[in-house]
Image (spheres, rainbow, N blue to C red):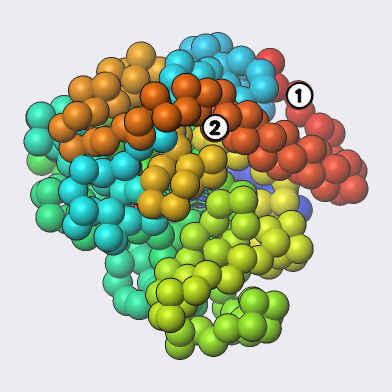
Amino acid sequence: MKTFFHLLQEVIKPGLCHRCGGCVSLCTAVNYGALEIGPDGRPRYKDVEKCIECGLCHAVCPEIDELETETHHRLHWSAPIGRVLSVGIARAVDPEVRRHATDGGLVTALLLHLFHTGHIDGAIVARRTGRFEREPFLATTPEEIKESAGFFFDTSHGVAGLGEAYMARASVEALSPLMNKGLRRVALVGTPCQIQALRRMETLGVMPSESIAFCFGLYCSGNFLFDAPHRAQLAEAGSFSWDDVVKINVKDSFQVHLKDGSVRHLDIHVLDRLKRHACRYCEDYSAELADISFGGLGAPEGWTSYITRTPKGRAAYLDARGRTVEEMDRSKDPAVSDKVLETVMKAAAQKRAAARDHRRELGKPVIVAM
Ligand SMILES: Cc1cc2nc3c(=O)[nH]c(=O)nc-3n(C[C@H](O)[C@H](O)[C@H](O)COP(=O)(O)OP(=O)(O)OC[C@H]3O[C@@H](n4cnc5c(N)ncnc54)[C@H](O)[C@@H]3O)c2cc1C
Ligand code: SF4
Ligand code: SF4
Ligand code: SF4
């Protein structure tokens, strides 16, 4: 039976840990909490003697392919980017939601709709705690969901600071106590690696996945590091000052929105070295196992592109359309879905190819999904 000891050898020590927190969440929710997130955002033993050697942490890790085939099969995954039921571009009807959103505020608008119609009791999102800082958070009111709109970087740990502890801290520190109060229908907003860990838990049929009613995945080209040296490199590359930054967004380029209204576009591939190391080996761009995937890619400024992937995700989207969600007028461009899909598939293929190249350089076998 492979345990966390093997995750340390196979995943964490070689630098392949996505810091999704899945292993820690699971061990804390199901067992005696042998693991914790360390100060560097990576999981570690909290008390090795509490490990019952059940092997669950090893099985749910997105870097381990043990449950991949079964999980893919369960979610009707197919190449090249997973199941696709519908594709389009939409935004929040409420201009207030759009004003604080990363792109069109579609994620927030959908969460609000699900909440108001009684389909969810809460949503695991990322709450703003400072100018660029965020922390994982279980929002249980419409106000909290609205306040969590947007995409900000944690200046001490960067986006990695959110992603690193995101699932672990959210599900263990925020979700677990509320589960005890009977909160069992929660939407999880996360990066593809977080969705993958959660889906593996579902395949195993273990907590805390039982409480997740919807998986909303964000397209992801990587978590960029935002410690002082990396911030300085970015500012130099984009000729801007951090004092002038009002928003950052990642689409086909790394976009820095400045106070004077101008936007600096930095080449994502040139910024590769600023990504968290494990992101170089990650093959999932479009959150292939989500109920709905979202991104700015393929959409005009102020709109969000989406891919519904499960009947549940598609139904939720259609129910919100015309209420909290406004779909972009398709009559102006009947080929809009094809164009978005093509753009996302291209970005996904680039990310997958780069990840496989990096894996070969590392001497690791390339896993071809089935
Ligand atoms: C690390 C990262 C990389 C991304 N890379 C790309 C990319 O390459 N191309 C692209 O098109 N889109 C990318 N996105 C997605 C994009 O930034 C938007 O989140 C998406 O377009 C939805 O926009 P929205 O206005 O509809 O969402 P909003 O209505 O603003 O809602 C966004 C939701 O995501 C939550 N959130 C924010 N940051 C995080 C986080 N780090 N982890 C988990 N949840 C979070 C917020 O709390 C909020 O609930 C990335 C997102 C992240 C977090
Ligand atoms: S108890 Fe199970 S889940 Fe926890 S560390 Fe040990 S093997 Fe992993
Ligand atoms: S990738 Fe996720 S599940 Fe795997 S070791 Fe890292 S934090 Fe744990
Ligand atoms: S690229 Fe995105 S999905 Fe992949 S490991 Fe990094 S943060 Fe997770």
Work out whether 196 lies above or below 79: below
Q: Quadrant of the C terminus?
A: top right
The residue under the point 62% across, 35% down is 343
- Left or right of 277 in this view: 19: left
Coordinates of residue 119 in the picture (x, y in percent): 16, 28
Residue 366: name its quadrant.
Answer: top right
Q: Quadrant of the N terminus?
A: top right
Indicate the secondary structure of the residue bearing disc 2. Answer: helix
Q: Nearer the viewer, residue 249 or 216?
A: 249
Query: Label 1 amino acid?
Result: Val
The residue under the point 57% across, 29% down is 339
Residue 266: name its quadrant.
Answer: bottom right
Question: For the residue carrying disc 2, how many other residues have a C-alpha within 10 Å: few (<14), some (14-19), or many (20+)?
Answer: many
Badge nearest the viewer, 2 or 1: 2
Work out whether 262 lies above or below 114: below
Earlier-in-chain disc, 2 versus 1: 2
Q: How many marks?
A: 2
| Residue denoted by label 2 | 340
Question: For the residue carrying disc 1, how many other residues have a C-alpha within 10 Å: few (<14), some (14-19), or many (20+)?
Answer: few
Residue 78: name its quadrant.
Answer: top right
Coordinates of residue 357 in the picture (x, y in percent): 85, 43
- Left or right of 358 in this view: 261: left
| Residue denoted by label 1 | 368
Query: Label 2 amino acid?
Result: Val
The residue under the point 39% across, 26% down is 330
Instruction: Please indicate, yes or no, whether residue 261 appears anywhere in the rendered image.
Output: yes
- Left or right of 131 in this view: 121: left
**Residue labelled 1 has its Cβ within 8 Å of some atom of ligand 4:** no
